[in-house]
Amino acid sequence: MARLGISPQKKALVYTRNFTNRLIHWVVFFSVIVLMVTGYYIGEPTAVYGHGEAYNEFVMAQIRLYHFYAAMVLDVSLIVWLYLAFFSRHVTYWREMIPTPTSVRGAIEVAKCYFTFKKPPFYKHFDPLDGLLFLVLILLMALQLLTGLHLYALALPNDYWWAQLIHISTNWLVWLLGGSPNVRVVHHITEWIMLAGIIVHVYLQVTKTIIWQDGHIGQMVGGYKYKDIK
């Protein structure tokens, strides 16, 4: 293991995540979990059944309500996160998420490290691969927001001002995707893509924490990770 430079003995603690950033991370995490569970039920209602008389049960209505609440929490959290990515007094992240030729080459080099076990250079916040993956994840969440709002508005009265505002903002998706049913299909497919992306993200962070012993998971709790001292 020493030849690979995986587990050096000397390390220094580096402060990488402030409280606000860590809080937003976990709010996004739990809201996405709620969205996926409730979204699965909405797409497959027979997965869960109510109990008692039908007129006393409103399972779909309740699940849709939880789905809507979680979506609003996620949307607000992402807006705050994006604002801080550009204007935070602690650190701005937006440069680490731009797909420049340099960042793409860096992402490829980091990806190679997962196969060779060669430890990549120390990155205080995002490594290039994480930065690009986060950019893709944010774009997928934005797509989920737009398609989800369109589907939500379909159940509202057309003369309701909130529904009219949503239709103005999202009806271009109907033209682009060829109808509201296709909007629903894209919403569901994107959910599974995001689930796969989250699994990959968690796997990468566990890999870094166990193999390279850098404390990548711990930094989202305590705010610190380890840097090797040569």
Image (cartoon, grey):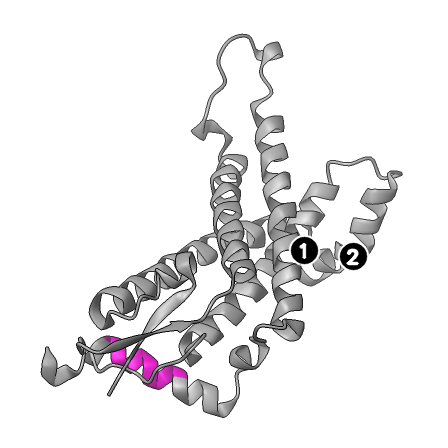
Image location (x, y in percent) of residue 175? 73, 60
Extreme-top residue of the structure: 53
Label 1 element class: helix
Residue at 56% from the left image edge and 82% from the top image edge: 95
Query: In the displayed structure, does residue 183 sit left or right of residue 49?
Result: right
State the residue in front, 126 or 149: 126
The residue at the point 43 percent across, 63 percent down is 223
**Quadrant into which the C terminus falls:** bottom left
Q: Is residue 182 visible?
A: no
Check whether the beta carbons of the residues at disc 1 and disc 2 lie within 8 A of each other: yes
Q: Residues within 10 Å of mark 1 (few under 14, many from 20)?
A: some
Q: Is residue 80 above or below residue 150?
A: below
- State the residue position of label 2: 169
Residue displayed at 82% across by 35% down: 157
Q: Which mark is residue 146?
A: 1
Question: Quick one: label 2, few (<14), some, or many (20+) residues within 10 Å?
Answer: few
**Which quadrant would the N terminus be assigned to in this image?**
bottom left
